[in-house]
Amino acid sequence: MTKVLVCLPTLNEQQSISLMISQISALGLDLAVCDAGSTDGTVEIAKQMGVPVIFRDKPGKGAGMQKTLQYAEGQGYEVVVFIDCDETYPVHDIPKLLSYADKYHMVVGARSQKQVAFFNALANHGFNFLINFLFWGKLKDINSGMRALRVKTYLPLIDADNFDVETQISCLTLRHRIPYIELPINYEERNGTSKVKYTDGIDILWRILKERLR
Ligand SMILES: Nc1nc2c(ncn2[C@@H]2O[C@H](COP(=O)(O)OP(=O)(O)O)[C@@H](O)[C@H]2O)c(=O)[nH]1
Ligand SMILES: [Mg+2]
């Protein structure tokens, strides 16, 4: 059977961490938190609940995801499911994603952009269009924060450190013709404040161009 690790990337998610951990633990899946230096007690809660915490050595969600893939490889995990720690993505759909993980190297929980806040949806439409145009793809949600990744495939590929990491994964998946599937999921409003800034949109755009020119 495939060895799976679920990872919650966190930066000050004290209001959601307990619920996220309980819901994932109830599925009987191994779990780790990858923290970016939270100061609100997120790490302490995770530790109290017996969840291993991976600490970043550089800031950024992408740096955290790279560190997690390294950790997963060291621990013999074959697949990592990343899911935002903010109650937006449906934890109960993780098994559905995993049921495709033998066949596909990436399984994405794809949001309908109707469920995303207006300006984010607008940006996502633009980014989806640009990536599909430049890389000949048909991706519906290039920036989803819920995805299962095969460790051996993605560990050597990812080097984006920030919120451009999902964009990079999307570009590289299309470029290298890595088998993937997107499954529709529900997306709820966030608990707590988003860590994404407008300048991250510029990072994402720049990332798309860099990946095209690479
Ligand atoms: N490891 C790590 N996680 C982060 C960092 N910044 C944000 N996160 C987490 O990554 C997830 C996505 O961030 P979020 O603010 O929800 O972005 P949004 O979904 O695009 O609004 C959340 O669980 C954050 O706590 C970081 O620098 N490192
Ligand atoms: Mg989020």
Image (cartoon, rainbow, N blue to C red):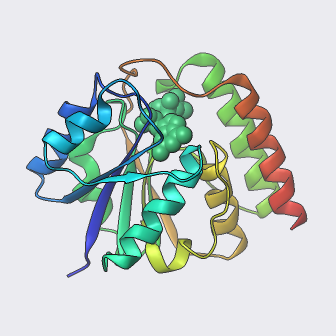
Residue 145 showing in the rendered view = no
Residue 3 showing in the rendered view = yes
- Residue 85, how many percent across, how many down? 35, 36
Tell which of 47 and 104 is nearer to you. Answer: 47
Quadrant of image for the C terminus: bottom right
Exactly how many numbered labels are in the figure?
Answer: 0
Give left or right: position of 152 versus 128. Answer: left
- Residue 205, how many percent across, how many down? 80, 42
Asked if residue 51 is positioned above or below residue 36 in the image, the reply reads below
- Residue 7, how many percent across, how many down? 34, 53
Residue shown at 42%/32% (left/top)?
38
Asked if residue 158 is positioned above or below residue 105 in the image, the reply reads above
Tell which of 148 and 156 is nearer to you. Answer: 156
Residue shown at 28%/27% (left/top)?
16
Give left or right: position of 28 versus 143. Answer: left
- Residue 154, how many percent across, how many down? 55, 71
Residue shown at 51%/25% (left/top)?
116
Q: Quadrant of residue 46?
A: top left
